[in-house]
Amino acid sequence: MKVIIGTKVGMTQIIGEDGLVTPITILQAGPATVTQIKTTDSDGYNAVQLGFGQGKNLSKSVSGHLKKSGVTPKILKEFRLNAEPECKIGDAFTVANFELGDKVAVTGVSKGKGFAGTVKRHNFIESRNTHGFKGSIRHVGSIGSMYPQKVFKGKKMPGRMGHDQVTVKNLVVAFIDPENNLLGVKGAVPGPKKGIVSVEGKE
């Protein structure tokens, strides 16, 4: 079972034996402890819940939930599985579960960019900036003043940009350091440095 939680450290590059330079993102991944196991008999689906980091000031309900695993993690994340998990509460998941060349999906929260207009947010084109034009070259324009006399949900408008959950699939594991719990994947990973990410490999 190739799943783990971690934080984004930053980007670097490695040089292979053939001399090729590969850009990679380094993740501080694990160890992640199993805090709960769900099965189709007890919960209606198969899943495993992992805890990562060191939390503090946990509520009584959360402390009671984690008592069996013997850890107090900062982050809890659930991973759905196709089959019943072959692990028990208290087991630790590390980068040793992954191998070089594995394809993984990395999920994180993208960087927030604040309030943005339609040109930046939705790639709208600017209006004509010719002689006699009013100068509102980046304005939205009409949004439905005639039929049907309302604005449909999902209309592309100015608003908050970024800070969304993003999953990047088919990233390849290119570097593993079991001693320091470091995992390197080819390409970019969503989110800022020290951002929480989850890594899920294909079985």
Image (spheres, helix red, strand yellow):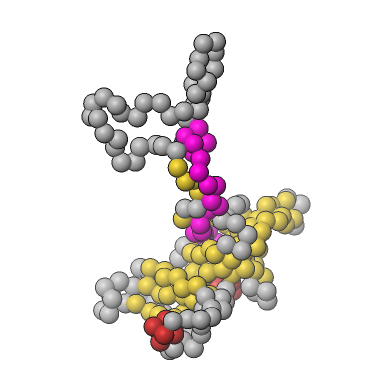
Q: In which quarter of the image is residue 10?
A: bottom right
- Residue range in magenta is 102-123
Q: How many marks?
A: 0
Quadrant where the C terminus sits is bottom left
The correct choice, above or below, for 170 with respect to 71 in the image is above
The correct choice, above or below, for 68 with respect to 79 in the image is below
Q: Does the magenta stretch include residue 196?
A: no
Q: Where is residue 48 in the image (x, y as percent from the top left)?
A: 41, 75
- Front-most of residues 53 and 116: 116
- Seen as rendered, the residue at the extreme left is 148
**Is 108 on the left-hand or right-hand side of 152?**
right
**Is 173 on the left-hand or right-hand side of 83?**
right
**Is 7 on the left-hand or right-hand side of 163?**
right
Q: In which quarter of the image is residue 40?
A: bottom left
Q: Where is residue 188 in the image (x, y as percent from the top left)?
A: 60, 52
- Taking the spot 54% from the left edge, 13% from the top edge, the residue there is 130
- Seen as rendered, the residue at the extreme top is 131
The correct choice, above or below, for 103 with respect to 46 in the image is above
- Front-most of residues 27 and 41: 27
Q: Is residue 119 magenta?
A: yes
Q: Position of residue 105 (x, y in %)?
A: 49, 58
- Taking the spot 26% from the left edge, 79% from the top edge, the residue there is 41
Asked if residue 169 shows in the view, the reply is no
